[in-house]
């Protein structure tokens, strides 16, 4: 449902210069609510190597399906960073813990080359019993890939203070952010996208306390559904575009 909506609206990776979908698998739970998914993503990266599509472009982006990704913003950020040409480099993306979270991973083509050449060695020495984002960062660092920092690339609710709501669109007003994560339902994803693109405002959405299943919502908002509304809805209560 989520990918079908993106494809229909030509948003997220479907508005990139080129894209490819890769299937994952159910991940195990690790310590402290972490996810053990390195082996899954190592397998996917090996498919990327086999496909070779990344070699046609200067940059490669790995983005989670539930991240509201805005490719045009990423292009503007990269231009602003002015990274050296033909150089292995990846981007630190968020001001949280180790500064690299997996919802949005941005690597230059040369960085992908080195990463794929060394991924099995990294798997052997770093191991695969943790999160793929930490594995990717440690592997890139250990093989000498440089990084640049742009903490406005990613807004991830998993880093927010307690009390956040998965479907709340308020974060999506930040015009500097390249990707907002996570939005797991199609309506919540599209609601965030519409707010990011200034098509709607958070105040247009149903309050999160009054939302129906699948609605995008406004945390702290007071709008509620009317008796004539029929499920499912997108959560937009007024000023509908």
Image: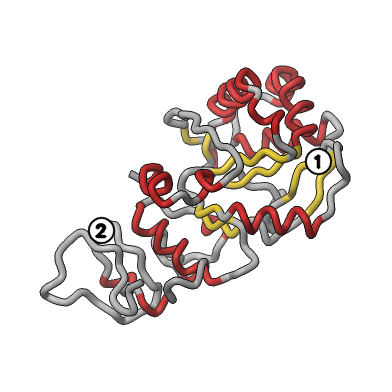
Task: Tell me the distance, in whole angstroms, between the alpha carbons under discs 1 and 2.
Answer: 41 Å
Sooner in the amino-acid sequence: mark 1 or mark 2: 1
Quadrant assignment, res 236: bottom left
Residue 32 x, y percent position in the rendering:
54, 44
In the picture shown, does residue 25 fall above or below 65? above
Which image quarter is the C terminus in? Answer: bottom left
Residue located at (76% from left, 21% from top): 118
In the picture shown, does residue 223 fall above or below 78? below
Which image quarter is the N terminus in? Answer: top left
In the picture shown, does residue 39 fall above or below 148? above
Q: Are marks 1 and 2 in contact (CB under 8 Å)?
A: no
Residue located at (42% from left, 30% from top): 26
**Left or right of 177, for residue 202:** left
Residue located at (82% from left, 31% from top): 142
List the residue tagged with mark 2.
213
Q: Secondary structure at mark 2?
A: loop
Quadrant assignment, res 90: top right
Q: Nearer the viewer, residue 136 or 169?
A: 169
Disc marking residue 89 = 1
Mark 2 is surrounded, within 10 Å at the Cα level, by few (under 14), some (14 to 19) or many (20 or more) other residues, namely: some
| Disc number lying in front (1 or 2) | 1
Residue 191 x, y percent position in the rendering:
40, 63
Q: Nearer the viewer, residue 191 or 11?
A: 11
Q: Secondary structure at mark 1?
A: strand
Disc marking residue 218 = none
Residue 12 x, y percent position in the rendering:
51, 49
Quadrant assignment, res 183: bottom left
Residue 200 x, y percent position in the rendering:
42, 73
Mark 1 is surrounded, within 10 Å at the Cα level, by few (under 14), some (14 to 19) or many (20 or more) other residues, namely: many
């Amino acid at each position: 449902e989520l990918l079908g909506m993106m494809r229909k609206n030509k948003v997220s990776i479907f508005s990139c210069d080129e894209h490819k979908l890769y299937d994952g698998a159910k991940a195990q739970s690790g310590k402290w609510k972490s996810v053990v998914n390195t082996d899954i993503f190592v397998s996917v990266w090996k498919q990327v190597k086999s496909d070779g599509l990344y070699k046609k472009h200067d940059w490669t982006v790995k983005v989670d399906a539930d991240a509201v990704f805005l490719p045009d913003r990423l292009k503007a950020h990269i231009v602003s960073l002015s990274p050296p040409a033909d150089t292995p480099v990846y981007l630190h993306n968020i001001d949280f813990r180790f500064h690299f979270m997996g919802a949005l991973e941005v690597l230059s083509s040369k960085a992908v080359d080195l990463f794929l050449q060394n991924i099995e060695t990294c798997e052997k020495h770093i191991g695969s019993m943790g999160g793929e984002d930490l594995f990717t960062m440690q592997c890139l660092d250990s093989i000498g890939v440089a990084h640049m920092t742009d903490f406005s690339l990613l807004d991830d609710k998993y880093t927010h203070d307690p009390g956040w709501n998965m479907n709340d669109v308020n974060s999506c007003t930040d015009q500097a952010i390249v990707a907002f994560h996570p939005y797991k339902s199609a309506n919540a994803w599209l609601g965030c996208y519409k707010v990011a693109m200034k098509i709607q405002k958070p105040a247009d959405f149903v309050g999160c306390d009054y939302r129906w299943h699948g609605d995008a919502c406004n945390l702290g908002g007071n709008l509620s559904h009317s008796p004539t509304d029929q499920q499912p809805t997108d959560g937009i209560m007024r000023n509908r575009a």
